[in-house]
Amino acid sequence: MGQYWTVINIDNRESSGRLGKLGEFFWHFNPIINYLVAPNIPTCYKLRTPMEKSQTNSSGATLLTLPDELLLIIAEELVEDYLVLMCLSLTCVAMWEVTEQVRYRSLYAKLKTFSWAGGRIILLGDYGRALPHGVLTAEDIKQLKLTEYHKKNLGTGLYDQHFKEPNSDISLFMEGRVQSNAALGRELLEFSRKKPFSDWICLKWKDFMLARTAGDYWMIRNFTKREFTKSSRPNLTQVLYCLIGCSQDPSVSMPGGEDLINGKWAGHRIDITLASVHKQEHEEDSNWKDITPHIKEFLEWSAKAGGDRKFKFH
């Protein structure tokens, strides 16, 4: 039958679904790459966008007799619940303006819960049995109900988990509380048809992805080992696969595939970002190792052996 593979985010309990045999999917783009790009909120979200006066009917509300400082304290208590914070923000002009920075922080926290950036990522084969040491914690094993598996078979147990695929539609309309409350859904729908509210309600994952500018380049970073590799956007998928594969069975369906089953980054904390972002985050920290030459050499050889495919590295 051959060995089948899946990409798993251990922290989010999500996966790519079964991808097929290595040679069948290796050279194709995988949208999972998009979820590994650290989310970025466009600057337009930080700009003050006041609500029109005609859109409030709460001028006599007791809550609004409180000073802004107290209204801000109330909003801060809701920062971990984006839906509730948005409902509060939409009540009137004053609340919309007071909650501006809190909304931004709450939105970023919401995006992080959907993102794979910084998660433990592994490309796992169904013939794999053991996992690299330390990939699963004792708490992971308990939560995933793998306690009956010997440590030499944890890979089998992890592969057999029925993880869901990540959801690209993260709008507030997808919230279970909105779907079960018709009145709330109708009210949000009305706001979603107007600026600036629509951007805060009709959230799409693609709207928060980094955009590369001339002279910049993409990096896949390993926070566990503090290593990185550079790549052009079209080849990020292949570069990632070269590093996160895990299996004990060398039966693969592509030239050089046997070198991928013991990925040096399998189960490590990984994200994708731009070099400019990395420089800002680690401006005074040069303790990162560039492993691009090794990956570049392998991919160029494998591409040639597999049909003279072209790879472009920075």
Image (cartoon, helix red, strand yellow):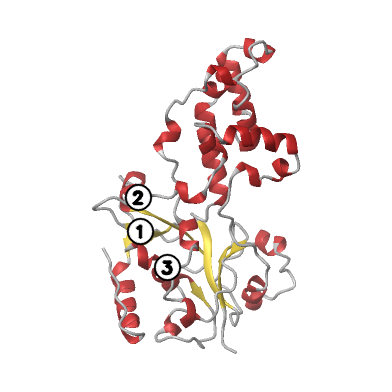
Residue at image position (31%, 45%) is: 283
Q: Nearer the viewer, mark 3 or mark 2?
A: 3
Residue at image position (70%, 41%) is: 178
Q: Say which mark, if any, is on residue 237.
A: 3
Q: Give the residue pinned by disc 1.
A: 219
Q: Give the residue pinned by disc 2.
A: 278
Instruction: Residue 281 in the image: state x and y as whole percent.
Output: 36, 45
Q: Are marks 1 and 2 in contact (CB under 8 Å)?
A: yes
- What amino acid is at disc 3? Thr
Indicate the secondary structure of the residue bearing disc 1. strand
Tell which of 52 and 241 is nearer to you: 52
Q: Residue furthest left?
A: 215
C-alpha distance separating marks 3 and 2: 19 Å
Mark 3 Cα-neighbour bin, 10 Å: few <14, some 14–19, many ≥20 = many
C-alpha distance separating marks 1 and 2: 8 Å
Label located before the other in sequence (1 or 3): 1
C-alpha distance separating marks 1 and 3: 12 Å
Instruction: Residue 225 in the image: state x and y as whole percent.
Output: 42, 61
Above/below status of 21 relative to 91: below
Instruction: Residue 6 in the image: state x and y as whole percent.
Output: 56, 72
Indicate the secondary structure of the residue bearing disc 2. helix
Above/below status of 137 relative to 99: below
Indicate the secondary structure of the residue bearing disc 3. helix
Tell which of 209 and 59 is nearer to you: 59
Q: Nearer the viewer, mark 1 or mark 3?
A: 3
Q: Quadrant of the N terminus?
A: bottom right
Tell which of 242 and 309 is nearer to you: 309
Label located before the other in sequence (1 or 2): 1
Instruction: Residue 278 in the image: state x and y as whole percent.
Output: 35, 50
